Image: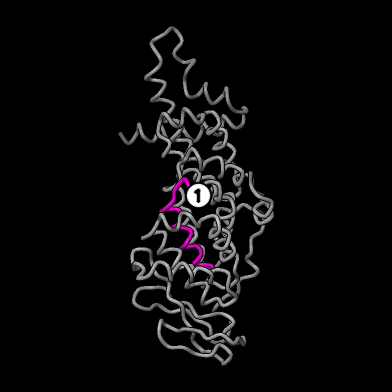
């Protein structure tokens, strides 16, 4: 079951809380050594803390800072920790009001997840809620680093995260559906890491409620995740999960508002048709009525007439295309 907080977050698309960087005087983005660099937002706010720029220079955040920058480090470029114990102490920065310390702590979570999985594993229950808090942060540097942290956590801990997945999933679907492109792209990569790391038998039930979300962009992102996850079940896994359940899910997405949802549904239906035909060929002996086990009859027996018609239109057209191209 999803938590109350997750359900409240579910239907919230925080587009309004993000400001276009180019609309603020002095704010801009630029590349540096192939990595994305972002200007620090709200740069003229006063704070007693110091801000570390580009890993070296330190300035007083109370002064007007024209070009404070944060570098996003890809997972493969993260270095191991020299002192794990000191790093664990620094994780207290996840709850800091100083966003620079939060970003540093998030990157340390990533390093621990990659290089010291066992140490980090014991702390996941305490760390994940703080990562979720950072995902909600309106400052882009914190939010994107938290998204990258989520991806590394998925890759490291797989199904061990399933009980803590809902709040992460809600936020990543929201972030992947917003208008700020570099945050959206990072969230999409994190969702891809989730679908390749978490077993589909565990993940699909978590994704299914979002397919009916009132926000069409949330539905579209969830549909794409669902479509990517199903083939990982394999033929036997699909049969175990229930091909009838899966075809009903896909059929419901065929008439969705956004093309991404409809395309994901079409892709999923073709996968299910292939699995059904293969398994039927293996288990069905020649009889007087082989048509009783046909894909067409299966669809008509599991779906409403209109839904069955839509599904068969999609799969028949694809099948005719394969025949013509062969």
Q: Nearer the viewer, residue 114 or 84?
A: 84
Specify start and end residues of the magenta stretch as a single range: 143-161
Which residue sits at x=64%, y=53%? 6
Report x, y in % for residue 68.
49, 84
Which residue sits at x=52%, y=23%? 298
43 in relation to 175, above or below = below
> Is residue 117 covered in magenta?
no
Q: Quadrant of the N terminus?
A: top right
Report x, y in % for residue 55.
41, 81
75 in relation to 304, above or below = below
Report x, y in % for residue 264.
49, 44
Residue wearing tag 1: 161
Q: Nearer the viewer, residue 298 or 5?
A: 5
Report the predominant secondary structure element of the magenta stretch: helix
Q: Residues within 10 Å of mark 1 (few under 14, many from 20)?
A: some
Q: Nearer the viewer, residue 232 or 105?
A: 105
Which residue sits at x=41%, y=32%? 319
Report x, y in % for residue 254.
56, 40
Looking at this view, name the residue that lies furthest to the front.
85
> Is residue 156 covered in magenta?
yes
Looking at this view, name the residue that lies furthest to the left.
326
Q: Quadrant of residue 244?
A: top right
Whether residue 189 is visible to the viewer of this picture, yes or no, is: no
């Amino acid at each position: 079951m999803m938590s109350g907080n997750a359900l409240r977050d579910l239907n919230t698309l925080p587009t309004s809380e993000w400001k276009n960087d180019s609309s603020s005087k002095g704010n801009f983005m630029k590349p540096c050594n192939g990595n994305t660099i972002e200007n620090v937002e709200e740069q003229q706010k006063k704070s007693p803390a110091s801000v570390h720029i580009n890993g070296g220079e330190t300035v007083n955040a109370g002064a007007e800072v024209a070009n404070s920058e944060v570098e996003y480090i890809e997972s493969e470029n993260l270095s191991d920790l020299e002192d794990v114990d000191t790093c664990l102490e620094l994780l207290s920065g996840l709850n800091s009001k100083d966003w620079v310390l939060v970003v540093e702590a998030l990157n340390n979570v990533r390093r621990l997840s990659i290089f010291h999985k066992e140490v980090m594993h014991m702390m996941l229950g305490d760390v994940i809620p703080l990562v979720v808090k950072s995902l909600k942060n309106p400052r882009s540097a914190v939010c994107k680093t938290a998204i990258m942290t989520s991806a590394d956590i998925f890759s490291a801990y797989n199904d061990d995260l399933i009980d803590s997945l809902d709040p992460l999933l809600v936020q990543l679907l929201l972030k992947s559906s917003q208008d700020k492109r570099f945050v959206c792209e990072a969230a999409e990569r994190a969702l891809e890491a989730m679908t390749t790391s978490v077993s589909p038998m565990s993940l699909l039930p978590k994704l299914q409620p979002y397919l009916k979300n009132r926000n069409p962009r949330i539905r579209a992102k969830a549909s794409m995740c669902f479509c990517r996850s199903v083939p990982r079940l394999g033929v036997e896994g699909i049969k175990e999960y229930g091909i009838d359940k899966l075809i009903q899910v896909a059929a419901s997405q065929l008439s969705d508002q956004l093309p991404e949802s409809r395309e994901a549904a079409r892709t999923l239906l073709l996968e299910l048709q292939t699995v059904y035909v293969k398994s039927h060929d293996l288990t069905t002996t020649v009889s007087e009525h082989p048509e009783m086990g046909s894909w067409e009859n299966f669809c008509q027996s599991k779906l409403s007439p209109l839904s069955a018609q839509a599904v068969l239109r999609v799969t028949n057209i694809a099948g005719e295309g394969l025949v013509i191209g062969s």
